[in-house]
Image: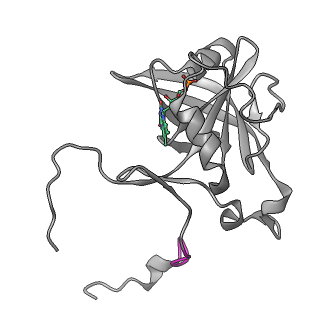
Amino acid sequence: MTKNPRGSRMPPLALPICLLGANVDGNPNYCTIAWFTMIDDEPPTIGLVTGKDRKTKDGIVENRTFSVSVPSADMAVPVDYVGITSGRKEDKSTVFRSFYGKLKTAPMVEECPVTMECELRRIVELEGTDLIIGEIVEVYVEESVYHGDEPDPLVLDPLMYLSSGAAYHRLGERVDDAFKAGKKYRRGT
Ligand SMILES: Cc1cc2nc3c(=O)[nH]c(=O)nc-3n(C[C@H](O)[C@H](O)[C@H](O)COP(=O)(O)O)c2cc1C
């Protein structure tokens, strides 16, 4: 295989997209986030990397709560809109329908099949960005995405962002069983 060096440019990655939500001065504001990940499971802790000037961050600091909503692939247009338009320039409070859970101040997106409300634990100030770390207080999953007792990520149809080429995609086919496929590994084959 031939590897082409690309310098220190961003590597091409396929990332799920989420909507980070917070109340700013009492109104919901959402922005699109590709740089997010679970960082612990006990307690369930999530981390999101944001630019320092995000209006959504103002609301997180204000209330010490926020939400993460996982959009489906058919939501690409409004999801992209809140990702290219700051709440500092336009009122984005009605782009999605909002609902609230236990925390009362973390607006979640009604149209998203999976949403979670979070309490802010800390903000790690990095040089050009901030890492927002929060504990998940409650997860809400749309009834229609359940397959038996568990939510089915394929029915959920998450919106994926391909950083190289800047395109939105949906998930592809099943490849193998996670945490089992490795048992088939044979050294040297
Ligand atoms: C596909 C996509 C992915 C994005 N990922 C991030 C991200 O991971 N972190 C971030 O801070 N901004 C990200 N953005 C940009 C913000 O969503 C954008 O700056 C937004 O307008 C901020 O809104 P606000 O100022 O109302 O909070 C992304 C935008 C798009 C379209």
- The residue at the far bottom in this view is 189
Q: Which image quadrant: the C terminus?
A: bottom left
State which quadrant residue 5 falls in: bottom left
Q: Residue at coordinates 59% horizontally, 33% vertically from top-left?
A: 82
Please provide the residue range marked out in magenta: 173-180
Decide if residue 121 is on the left or right side of residue 113: left
State which quadrant residue 101 falls in: top right
- In the rendering, at what x and y percent does residue 103 appear? 80, 26
Q: Residue at coordinates 74% horizontally, 18% vertically from top-left?
A: 27
- In the rendering, at what x and y percent does residue 158 appear? 62, 56
Nearer to me, 132 or 15? 15
Work out whether 176 lies above or below 146. Answer: below
Q: Is residue 178 magenta?
A: yes
Decide if residue 125 is on the left or right side of residue 63: left
- In the rendering, at what x and y percent does residue 34 appear? 49, 42
- In the rendering, at what x and y percent does residue 20 appear? 61, 33
Nearer to me, 38 or 143? 143
Specify how the rendered protein is coloured.
one colour
- Classified by dominant secondary structure, the portion drawn in magenta counts as loop
Q: Residue at coordinates 39% horizontally, 83% vertically from top-left?
A: 185
Query: Would you say residue 42 is visible in this rendering?
Result: no
